[in-house]
C-alpha cells in the first residue's frame, strides 16, 4: 500500500512540473516582462527625448514637475529653476549638489583688512580696518569707542555719542543726544543767522526776514560785532541787528531773547507800515530792562505791515554807554505766533477798570454800554512808577487804532470797543496793579 501511494505522488509532481515549464524548459512571462534570474521583471519603457517613464507611461518633462521646477535626469528629481531641489534653500556662496545638498564653492579671495568666514565662504571686515577711536563690533562693523570723546565727556554705548560727563542738569534739553540749555537748543535749530551783517534800515542795511508758521516757533541767532564806522562820519557806531516779521492787524506773537554771551540783551519793537504812500517806522514797545539775560514780550500787531525787532546791548539801546560789541556777543531769539489773550467783559456802568501788569500777558477788555457818539477819555489813575503804561482802543470795525500813554481819548462809534492795556517800557519786572477810569468829555 505504501509503495502504491509513493508512486502516485511522484506521478503528480512530474505532471505539475511539465505544466510550469514551457517548450525547451524556460519561463513563460507575461506581456512587457522578461525572465531574469528565475523571475519575471518589467521591460524598461523606452521614452523619446523630452519625456520620462512614469510606470508604464511616458510623460512630458515640462509637465512632470511643478511650477518653477525642472526635471534633473541624473537623479530623477525635480529641481528649482536655480538648480536647487524643490523646497531647499541654500545660503550665500553655496550651491546645491545633485543630491539636493548645499555645498560650499571654491574659497573666495579676500583683500587686506578682511578675512574669510568659512561658514559662509565670504569676506568679513576685521579690526585692522578700524581707525583710531573705533573698534570692531559684534555686527562686523567699526564702532566708535570712548577714545573719540574729549575732556569732560563720556561715550554712550546706546547712542554712539559723546555726552557731557556731568550728565544733564535740571532744566536742560536733550537735543540730538546732547544736554543743552533751552537757549542752546534754540540756537542749534535757528532758521536765521544774522552773522554780523549790516541790517540797520537807516544805514543802508536790509533787516533779516523771519519766516513765520502757525503753531511753530522760529528761532534766530546773531552776534553784536565790534563797533565800526557805519555812517561814514569817521566815528565808531553801535552795531544792532534787525529782524522783520510780516503781520496783519490783530496778529499776536510771543517773543523771547536769550544771551549766549551778549551782556544784558535788549529788544526794541517797532512798527513798519505804509500810510498815505509814505513808509512809517514807529516805536511800539520794548522788553524790560534791569532783568538779566533773559527777556520775553507779548506783541499784538495794531496795523497792517511789519514788526521790526531791534536787538543790541541794553546799555547801548538806552544811550547810557559808548558803542560796544565783540566776537563773543552772541544771542538767540525766538518768536511764536499765538492766539492772544481772551477779552474780559466790562460794562462802563460797572465803574473803574482794575487789573495787573505782567511780562507776557497784556490785558484785553471788551468794553460795553458806551454812549454812542460821545467822546470818552480813559486814564490810568493808578500804575507802578517803574513802567510806562499804554492804552490802545479799537472803537469799531471802520475805526483806526488809537494808542496813548497814560490816557487815550476816542469817540464811541458803537456801543462797544476793545481796549488793550499794556506797557511800553519797564525798569525792572513789569508787575503791579492798575486802575483806569472812564470819563465822558463835553
Image (cartoon, helix red, strand yellow):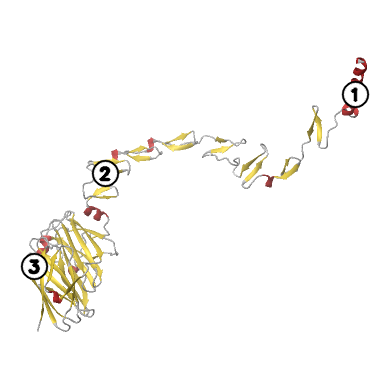
User: Which secondary structure, mark 1?
Assistant: helix
Which mark is nearer the camera, 1 or 2?
A: 1
Mark 2: few, some, or many residues within 10 Å (few <14, many ≥20)? Answer: some
Q: Is residue 166 visible?
A: yes
Name the residue: 16% across, 82% down: 371
**Which residue, given by chain and number where applicable, does mark 3 sit on?**
383
Name the residue: 68% across, 47% down: 63
**Vertical placement of 29 versus 204: above or below?**
above
User: Percent position (x, y) of residue 187?
Assistant: 24, 55
**Which residue, given by chain and number where applicable, does mark 2 sit on?**
163
Q: Give the quarter of the image for residue 89.
A: top right
Mark 1: few, some, or many residues within 10 Å (few <14, many ≥20)? Answer: few
Q: Earlier in the sequence, mark 3 or mark 1?
A: 1
Q: Nearer the viewer, residue 405 or 178?
A: 405
User: Percent position (x, y) of residue 409?
Assistant: 12, 78
User: Which secondary structure, mark 3?
Assistant: loop
**Which residue, given by chain and number where applicable, does mark 1 sit on?**
12
Amino acid at each position: 500500500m505504501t509503495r502504491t501511494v509513493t508512486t502516485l505522488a511522484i506521478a503528480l509532481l512530474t505532471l505539475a512540473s511539465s505544466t510550469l515549464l514551457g517548450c525547451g524548459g524556460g519561463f513563460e512571462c507575461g506581456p512587457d516582462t522578461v525572465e531574469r534570474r528565475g523571475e519575471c521583471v518589467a521591460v524598461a519603457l523606452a521614452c523619446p527625448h523630452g519625456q520620462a517613464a512614469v510606470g508604464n507611461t511616458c510623460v512630458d518633462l515640462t509637465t512632470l514637475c511643478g511650477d518653477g521646477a525642472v526635471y534633473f535626469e541624473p537623479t530623477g528629481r525635480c529641481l528649482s529653476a536655480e538648480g536647487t531641489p524643490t523646497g531647499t534653500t541654500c545660503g550665500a556662496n553655496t550651491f546645491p549638489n545633485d543630491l539636493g545638498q548645499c555645498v560650499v564653492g571654491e574659497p573666495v579671495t579676500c583683500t587686506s583688512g578682511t578675512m574669510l568666514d568659512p561658514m559662509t565662504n565670504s569676506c568679513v571686515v576685521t579690526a585692522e580696518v578700524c581707525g583710531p577711536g573705533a573698534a570692531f563690533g559684534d555686527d562686523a562693523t567699526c564702532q566708535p569707542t570712548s577714545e573719540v570723546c574729549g575732556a569732560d565727556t563720556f561715550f554712550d554705548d546706546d547712542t554712539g555719542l559723546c555726552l557731557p560727563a556731568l550728565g544733564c542738569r535740571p532744566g536742560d534739553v536733550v537735543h540730538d543726544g546732547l544736554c543743552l540749555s533751552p537757549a542752546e537748543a534754540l540756537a542749534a535749530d535757528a532758521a536765521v543767522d544774522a552773522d554780523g551783517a549790516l541790517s540797520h534800515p537807516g544805514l543802508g542795511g536790509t533787516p533779516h526776514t523771519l519766516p513765520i508758521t502757525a503753531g511753530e516757533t522760529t528761532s534766530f541767532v546773531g552776534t553784536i560785532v565790534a563797533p565800526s564806522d557805519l555812517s561814514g562820519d569817521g566815528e565808531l557806531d553801535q552795531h544792532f541787528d534787525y529782524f522783520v516779521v510780516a503781520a496783519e492787524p490783530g496778529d499776536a506773537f510771543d517773543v523771547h531773547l536769550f544771551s549766549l554771551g551778549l551782556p544784558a540783551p535788549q529788544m526794541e519793537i517797532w512798527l513798519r507800515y505804509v500810510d498815505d504812500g509814505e513808509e512809517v517806522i514807529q516805536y511800539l514797545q520794548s522788553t524790560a530792562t534791569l532783568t538779566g539775560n533773559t527777556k520775553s514780550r507779548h506783541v499784538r500787531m495794531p496795523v497792517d505791515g511789519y514788526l521790526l525787532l531791534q536787538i543790541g546791548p541794553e546799555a547801548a539801546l538806552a544811550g547810557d554807554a559808548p558803542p560796544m560789541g565783540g566776537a563773543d556777543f552772541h544771542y538767540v531769539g525766538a518768536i511764536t505766533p499765538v492766539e492772544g489773550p481772551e477779552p474780559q467783559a466790562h460794562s462802563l456802568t460797572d465803574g473803574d477798570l482794575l487789573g495787573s501788569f505782567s511780562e507776557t500777558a497784556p490785558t484785553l477788555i471788551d468794553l460795553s454800554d458806551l454812549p454812542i457818539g460821545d467822546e470818552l477819555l480813559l486814564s490810568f489813575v493808578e500804575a507802578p512808577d517803574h513802567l510806562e503804561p499804554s492804552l490802545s482802543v479799537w472803537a469799531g470795525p471802520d475805526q483806526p487804532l488809537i494808542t496813548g500813554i497814560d490816557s487815550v481819548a476816542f469817540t464811541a462809534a458803537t456801543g462797544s470797543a476793545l481796549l488793550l492795556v499794556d506797557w511800553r517800557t519797564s525798569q525792572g519786572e513789569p508787575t503791579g496793579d492798575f486802575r483806569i477810569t472812564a470819563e465822558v468829555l463835553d
